[in-house]
Image: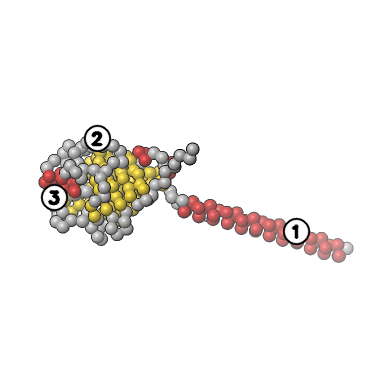
Amino acid sequence: MSRDTSTRIADRRLTGPRGRAIAVGTALLICAGAAGAAAASDDGGSRDAAHTQAREGAAHTQPREAAALTGSAKLSRKTTEDVTFTFDAHLAKRDNMRPDKATGTFRFVHLDRPGGKGGWAEGRVDCLMTGGKVATATGIITGTNLKGIKGGRVGFTVHDQGKHDRVGYSWASVGGPDGTKKLTKCTSAAPFEKVKKGTGDFHVRPWHPTYPTG
C-alpha cells in the first residue's frame, strides 16, 4: 500500500456477602439455657459473617484475570493527522502461562484529518503479555478498508504511564501493515509514539508468570 494511504495507517489508525421454688428454679435454668444457646448462635453467626466478609474481601483484592490491555487514545501529531488506537485484550487467570490464549479486540484508524479520509483496521487478539505497565499484544485483522492486509497479523506495544502513555506497532519500520501472517505472536516494536494529551488513556494489568522452583 502507498506511503500515502498505508503508511499512515501504520502511523495512523491506528475497558464480582446468617413446689414454687422448684418451678422457679426450673424456669431460670430454662431461660439461662435458652440465653446461652442464643448467645452461642449469635456468636457463631457473627463468626460466619466475618469469615464470609473476609473471603469476599480477598476475592475482591485478587485480580480477576492474569493480564489485560484496555483503553483508547490518539497519537500525538504536529500535522492534522488523526491516529487512534483502541484495545480490549484479556488473558484469563486459568490461562496464566498461556499468553497465546488471550482474547479480545483491537482497532486502529489513521485519517488525514479529523473526520477526513484514511484507513482503518480491526481484529481479534491472539496473544498478550505484560510486564509491569508495559504490554505487548498481537492479533489477526478481520476487517479493514485497506487492500491486502485482511487475515494478516499485527503487533502492538503500550507503555501505561498515566497521562503520558506511549504506543508502538509492528509495522513501524516498513511503512504500513503488509498482511504478513509470519509475524510471531506477541511481537511488536518499542512504544516510541506519544499519546496526545486529553484524547484518552490506556490501562495495563501486570502479568505474574509462575517461575520454576526446582
Foreground label between 2 and 3: 2
Comparing 42 with 6, the one in front is 6
Looking at the image, which residue is at 32% across and 54% down? Answer: 160
Residue 71 can be seen, yes or no: no
Mark seen at residue 181: 2
How many discs appear? 3
Foreground label between 1 and 2: 2
Looking at the image, which residue is at 39% across and 47% down? Answer: 207
Mark seen at residue 117: 3
Q: Amino acid at mark 1?
A: Gly
In the image, residue 184 above or below residue 65? above
Residue 54, quarter of picture? bottom right
Q: Amino acid at mark 3?
A: Lys
Mark seen at residue 33: 1
Residue 122, image x, y percentages: 24, 44
Q: Quick one: SS at disc 3?
A: loop
